[in-house]
Amino acid sequence: MSYKKNIASNLLAQVIRIILMFLTSILVARVLGAEGRGYITFIILIFGLIASYGHFGINHATAYFQKRSNYSQKEIFNSNISILLIIFSIIASLVFILRIQSLILTDYSFDLIIIGLSYVLINFIIITIQEFYVGNERIVEINKFLLIGESFIFLTTILLSITEVLSVRNYLILFVVSSLLRMLFFVKGLGINFKFSINATLIKQEIKYGFVAYLSALFIFLNYRADQFLIKSMLGIESLGIYSIAVNLAELAFLVPMSVTSALTGRLYNINNEIEDKKFIIYSTIKYTFYIAMIVSIIGMGMTPLIPFIYGQSFSDASNITFVLFIGIIFASIGKVSYAYFITEGRPIIHTIVTAITLLCNIILNIILIPYLGMMGAALASTLSYFIYGLLYIIIFVTKEGFTIKELLVPEKKDLLLLFNVLNVVKKTR
């Protein structure tokens, strides 16, 4: 499928997913309150971190080795899933041992920990398979499966709310079941029968390549979530619940970069040596992503006073926090799409350096500002780090990659034509 159609599919799917997630978050916030919201946020943060980064870089190498090596897709699939099952067994054992010793997650019962670990295992498999879909530019199918999962969460949350049985435990079970549904669709669509086998040479090569990309992905995840960990530690679970609403709303402006990244990565993997085509695709994508993210953020800023009326007065402090975070999201959108260029070029170290600097700035600023300004200090720290994230990529593109400021930031007629073509495809896709 073409690059434009994949982006169009992503845009349409992201709009629908954002609406569903927004409505779901309102239901959860109103029924469970700030403390319940914080309780859910923290456990998802912990197990989401493990699910996304417990693979030590193997998943980040999947698409690259699928498209840039002589290994068969089946061999890569079997080896990756097999080693991930072993890694999961070790992680699960460690989590239980540490919980029994009351060293971690002491506020969470063992049944919730089992639910969290189930989420980890399912998402290990989903992330692996999804990389094959990205490498083959099967973006429309990815979006279809994601929408099925999100629709299931939304409709079931409504049912639980109506029957008055929506609780932290039930919501987390629902969260895991939706992931299981997505996994089943992904597995069926891939069409490869799993057989436990490990190619040690392949795994070593994947870790060697993927670990650098893995570090950068981990750094940027922590950059987006470090403020929440620190708020939980310094201000408490209720403050985390309020702040998480602000984060979720501000990150709605990631609609465009989230829509672009997988399509962009797949396209760059499938362009061989057309240097000019690569250059045009990357700078045009950065430009329209930046400006559309800016438009979305400005609209979002104007709607922040509505937060207390939508979520309840207990979340009123989220209004100003969301406003500040929207500013940072505009600049973070640059980094969120730029990294695909270096990953597909086999130079993930660039992204690792950028994200390491950004994360360090974020943590330092949060530690300085939270004690004085509370949640607003965390928002200011994140916004400043997001600005640094985007700025660093602009500097690298200009000084090292031969791009110009005009190419990266000033709209031209051919860039606008690309955008209009994408929007036309979106209309036809509906």
Image (cartoon, rainbow, N blue to C red):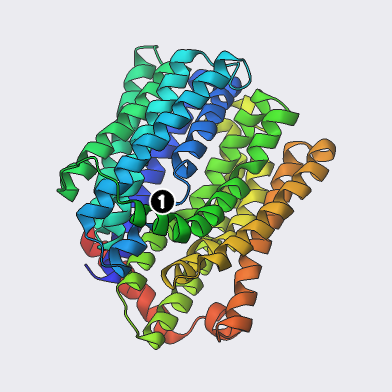
Q: Quadrant of residue 387?
A: bottom right
Amino acid bearing label 1: Ile
Q: Secondary structure at mark 1?
A: helix
**Residue ID for mark 1:** 58
Where is residue 115? Give x, y as percent. Answer: 41, 22
**Which image quadrant: the C terminus?**
bottom left
Locate residue 362 relative to residue 408 in the image: left or right. Answer: right
Residue 306 screen position, x and y as percent? 57, 39
Residue at 35%, 74% in the rendered image: 420
Please say if 396 is above or below 32. Answer: below
Q: Residue at x 47, y 20 (%)?
A: 113
The mark tally for this picture is: 1
Query: Where 354 sits versus 252, above or below?
Result: below
Q: Nearer the viewer, residue 88 or 51?
A: 88
Residue extending furthest toward the right: 372
Query: Would residue 320 be seen by someone viewing this image from the given angle?
Result: yes
